[in-house]
Amino acid sequence: MLNPARLIVTMDEPFPTTDPLTNQFGSLNDLVHELATLQDLATRGSWRSILDKVSLARSLNLLTNPHDNLIYLSYNVLALSKLRRFTDASNELDSLHDFNSHHYKYETYPQLYPNRSGSMVPFSLRFIQAQLRIKLGNRQEGLDRFYLLLNFICQKIKEKECNNLEESVNIWKKRENFVLNCLIGHHLGAKEFNVCLDLIKDLINRDYLDPVLVSKLGYIQMQIGDLKGAKGSFNRVETMLNEGKNDGYSFLSEVEFRNLVNRNKALVYLVGKDYVSAVREYEECIERNNTDVVAINNKALCLMYLRDLSDSIKVLENALERVPTMAVNEAMVINLCSMYELAYVNHSEIKRTLSNWIARVVPDDFDASCTRV
Amino acid sequence: MSTTQQGTHSLAFRVMRLCKPSFHVEPPFRIDPTDLFVGEDIFDDPLAASNLPPLLSSHVSKSTDSSDLTYGDRFLLHHPSDAMGFSGLLVLPQSFGAIYLGETFCSYISINNSSNFEVRDVIIKAEIQTERQRILLLDTSKSPVESIRAGGRYDFIVEHDVKELGAHTLVCTALYYDGDGDRKYLPQFFKFVVANPLSVRTKVRTVKITWRTNLGEPGRLQTQQILGTPITRKEIELQILEIPSRINLDRPFLVHLNLTNHTDRKLGPFEVCLSQNSAHEEKTVMINGLQTMALSQVEAFGSTDFHLNLIATKLGVQRISRITVSDKREKKSYDPLPDVEVGIIFAGFNIQYMFSCHLKLVNISSHMYING
C-alpha cells in the first residue's frame, strides 16, 4: 500500500529520505528500534536487562535516530528509577540539559521527520524528573516541578485547542489528569489532607465522575476521621453501580466495579470494628476474583483484629503461593512479616525462608528490605 | 529442652499494639505507554493521531490482562488514579506510635511456647501499671489455660481507655508448669508514654472534646470543673466565624465576624478597626477601604454578623492583628482579638493548583479531625 507521505517526500526532496515514523503503526518495532523487546523486559520487571540492552545498543551505535536515542534513554532512566538508583537516573536526565531545546524537536531534522513538528521528548521524562526530586528527598522542589508541569500542560492544551488538534488535546488532558493524581499521592504521603481533598474533589467535579476516584475520596475522608463524609462517598459509588453507570468507565470491568463496592463496605465495617462483617465482604470479593489482592490483604488484617493470627498468616501465605505475580507486593509482605514477628519468638528463620522464596519470584524492582531480615 | 537454669522460660510474650491500620500510600513509577514510546507532540500529526491509538491500546490490553502472569501492573497504569499509589490496601502499624490521653489502648498479646515440651495450667495476667494505679485487663486464674503444646500459642486482645498522662507499663505475667513439672513465673514489661493531644484553654465550667483520628479511631477528653472566683462576663464578644482558605496577595478578601451583646441593654453603635499596637509595627494585612467600619446598635442579648474587607500586602504567613471594636456612644474600646495567622499566596499561578495554606490548630498529634 502506498504511503502518501512517502510519495510527497520522494517528489519534493532532492535526497531520498525515509521518515522512520511513517512506516510504523504496524508494530512497536516500527516506532523504535526493538521497542517490543524493551517493552517485554519492562513488563516482566527485568530492569537490569534493560540497562544492559540500552548499554549494548549505545555501544554498538544501533541508535541512529534522535528519537531512538531519546526513547532508549527514557527506558534507561525508568529502569534506574525502578532499581532505586535515583541519583544515577537524575544524572542521566540532566545530560539532556533542556527538554525544550530545539535538539529534541522533529522540525530540527526535516530529513528524518519531514512534515512533522513539535517535541519528540517522551512525556514520561518530565514526570520522572519531578518524581525523582521527591525520591531524592527534595520534596519541595519536586512538588514545585509537578505544579510547573501542570502549567506547562495547560499551555499545551490551549495551544492544541487553538490549532484544532483534537487527538493531541485529549492526550494532553489525560496527562493533566495523570499529574493531578501524582500530586494527590504525594500530598497524601505527607498527610496534607486538605490539599488532597481539594484536588480530588476538583478532579471529580470535572468530567471524571469515576467510581474509583470517588472511592479514593472516601478513603481520604476515612483516613482523617470524617466517617460521615466517607459513607456519603461510598454511597455515591454504590448508586453508580446500581444505576448501571459503567458505560463510561471502560477502566472498570463489571467484576472490578462490584468488588470495589464490596471493599468500600468492608472498610466501613472495619472502622466500626465489625471485623466479622468486613471479612464477609472481602470473601465475596475473593470469590468473584481470586486475584483481588487488596481484598485478600485487608481480609487477613481483619482476621488478626479478630484474634485469629494463624488464619491471617495463612491467607497471606496462600495468596503468595497461588498468585505470586499479583500478591508479591511490598506492603503485603510487610504485613506478613509483622504477623510473623508477633507469632514466632524466633521469627528470623521464617522471615528468611520467606525472603528466599520471594527472591526467586520477584521482579528486579522489588524492594527486599521490606522483609526486615 | 529442659533446663534447671533459672530464667530460661518455655514461654515468651509477644506484643503488638493494635491501633487502626493505615492506608498504604506510595506514588509509583507507573506510566502510560503513550508517554514512553513516542514523542509528546506526535499526536499533532494526523497520521499518528489516527494510527497510533489502536496500536497502543491493543498492546496495553495484552499486558495488563490479569491472567497474564507478568509484572505489568508495577509499571503500567491500569486506571489513571493508579498514579496516586493509594489502592485502599491497609498496612499494620509498623511502630508503637504515639498514644494520647482519651484514646483506647488496644494490644494483641501472644504467649508462645518455643520449647519442645507442653506447658500446663497456665495462669495469664495482663495489667496496666501507671504512677497511680494498677489496672487488671486480663486474668485467667479462675480458668487457667490447660495446656499450650510445644510450638503452640495462646492469643488474646486487651483494651484499656487511657485516662492518665505519662509512663504506663503493660505487665504481662504467666504462671505455668513447664516440661519438667516446675512451676515457673514469667513477667514481661512493655513500657509506653501517654501524651496530651490538645492544649485546652477554657472559658466555661467544663469542656468536653471528642475527636476522630486515623481511620476514625475515637478519642475523648473532658476537663475538670473550673472552680475559683467567677470571671466577669464580657459585655460584648467579637469572634471570627470564617476566614477564606485561600488568600491572595493584593486581592481583597472577606472575613466573616460576629458581634454578640451579652448584656441586658441595647449597646452601640460600634466601630471596628485594626488598631495599632504600642510599637506601631507596620501591618501587612489591612482593611481595604475606609479604615473603620461602622456597625449599628445591637439589641440586648442580640448579635450581628458582618464582614471585614481586608487586603494583604505581603506573601507568606502574616497576621490579622488587633481587630478592635469600640462603642461610639459610651466612648470605650474593648480588648482587641488575638492575632490570627493566615497564609498569603501569589495569585499569579493558575489558581486551581495552589498549595493550600491551612491554619493549624494547637494540635500535637499528627492528624486529627475535630467534631463539633
Image (cartoon, coloured by chain):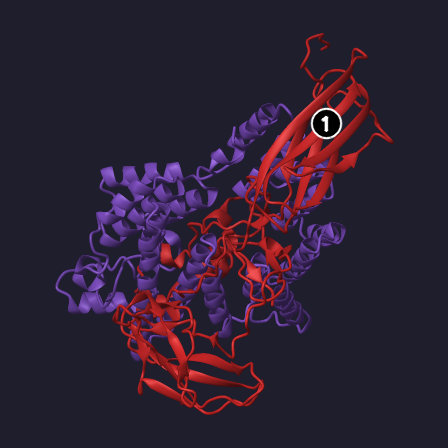
In front of the other: B49 or B343: B343
Q: In the drawing, does residue B179 fall left or right of residue A220?
A: right
Location of the N terminus of chain A by quadrant is bottom left
- Name the quadrant containing residue A98: bottom left
**Residue that lies at the very extreme toward the left in this rendered image:** A14
Q: Which residue is mark 1?
A: B173
Q: Which chain is red?
A: B
The structure residue drawn at horizontal position 20% and vertical position 59%, both measured from the top left corner, is A112
In front of the other: B77 or A1: B77
Q: In the drawing, does residue A353 fall left or right of residue B252?
A: right
Point out residue A149 in the picture as x, y percentages from the top left corner: 32, 62
Residue A157 appears in the rendering: yes
Residue at disc 1, secondary structure: strand
Point out residue A349 in the picture as x, y percentages from the top left corner: 59, 23
On screen, B98 above or below A225? above
Point out residue B369 in the picture as x, y percentages from the top left corner: 56, 61
Which chain hosts label 1? B
Q: Which chain is purple?
A: A
The structure residue drawn at horizontal position 26% and vertical position 71%, both measured from the top left corner, is B280
The structure residue drawn at horizontal position 31% and vertical position 44%, both measured from the top left corner, is A89
